[in-house]
Image (cartoon, grey):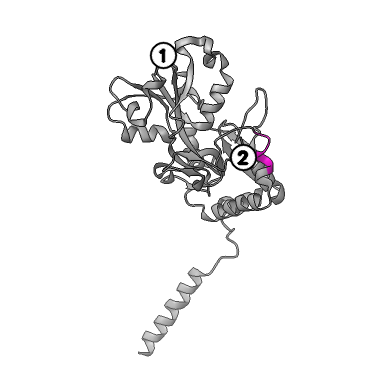
Amino acid sequence: MKRFLLLMTGFCMVALAACAPNASTPSPAPRGGLEKIQKTGILRVGYFPFEPAAILDPGAQKPRGFFVDLVEDIAREMRWKVEYVQVDLKNFAAGLASGDFDLSIGATFSSPSRAGGVLFSRPLFYLGYTGVSTAANATRFKTWADVDQKGVRVAVKQGSAIADYARVHFKNATIVSLEAPNLNAPLAAVPGQADIGLMNQVTVFTYLRDNKDKTSPTAGATRIVEVLSDQPKEFTGICWAVRPDDIRFLEFINSSIKHEIDTGRYDEYIAPYDIPNLYRERETYSFKTKSFSGQISR
């Protein structure tokens, strides 16, 4: 028994020594986004052009916009430098996973398929999808069921939430999936490649605003108009995103967004952009009456 106790005592001492930290071994580099950013003082932000969240002017070195102002304000308080990385919508999750940037400000619709690869922040606003078609075809698309018909060519952007919806729910229409980086690519495909192009309400608004030659009455039967505006599909939150294992950083981002809202800076930064259909709360859209209220900006 005495020999056994001596052996066990020796074993325990060896095990404890093995578990004890070695003063000569350097501490591992911080893996989490927040710890790394605090150490380096640099916040790397992924984005893709989406008015009014992030706008890249010709020749500009970095974007401007509502989301950019919010990120810059957070970084200023933390004394961080912000570096921007432009990315395509379909690649933002891969960019986070590979470490190309720490935070994606999108702007990105949250969805189950995307949530499998990233952690989404609290929504910054809510938005839905509508579409454009020619004036001659406008009466053809009164409901979403009218879109999913044989012979109808529907243009969507790869990686968009409406592309995921069409893939799952459309059984009859022909889906024209476009890889072009511009969000307005499905809209520009009408007429020609498609009978109807689907995209979020804000991009539809800015496309029609910026393409007067395609929307003026003089364009005749090929004039482009919005359709399904009274029944936006996939009405959900527009969010930022972090890596799926970075819960601590997500908590920081959510707290920071709340701070921006509570202090009134959120409203201050969005005020200069005259864009409709930005809804602060989910409850401001009524599916029962198909009506909207409480827009942030008009």
In front: mark 2 or mark 1?
Answer: 1
Give the quarter of the figure containing the N terminus. Answer: bottom left
Residue ID at (56%, 26%): 206
The secondary element bearing badge 2 is classed as helix
Name the residue type under label 1.
Gly
Q: Position of residue 177 (x, y in %)?
A: 39, 25
The secondary element bearing badge 1 is classed as loop
Q: Is residue 88 visible?
A: no
Question: Closer to the camera, 217 or 41?
Answer: 217
Q: Position of residue 162 (x, y in %)?
A: 41, 33
Residue named by callout 1: 192
Residue named by callout 2: 67
Question: Closer to the camera, 40 or 96?
Answer: 96
Q: Position of residue 75 (x, y in %)?
A: 68, 46
Residue 293 position by quadrant? top right
Residue at the front extreme of this rendering: 289
Q: Residues within 10 Å of mark 2 (few under 14, many from 20)?
A: many
Q: Is residue 188 visible?
A: yes
34 over 51 or under it: above or below: below
Alpha carbons under labels 2 and 1: distance apart: 34 Å
Residue ID at (50%, 24%): 184
Residue ID at (65%, 39%): 270
Region of the chain picked out in magenta, as a range: 268-273
Q: Position of residue 87 (x, y in %)?
A: 53, 32
- For the residues bearing labels 2 and 1, Cβ distance under 8 angstroms: no
Name the residue type under label 2.
Phe
Q: How many marks?
A: 2
Q: Residues within 10 Å of mark 1 (few under 14, many from 20)?
A: few
- Lateral position of residue 269 relative to residue 28, left or right: right
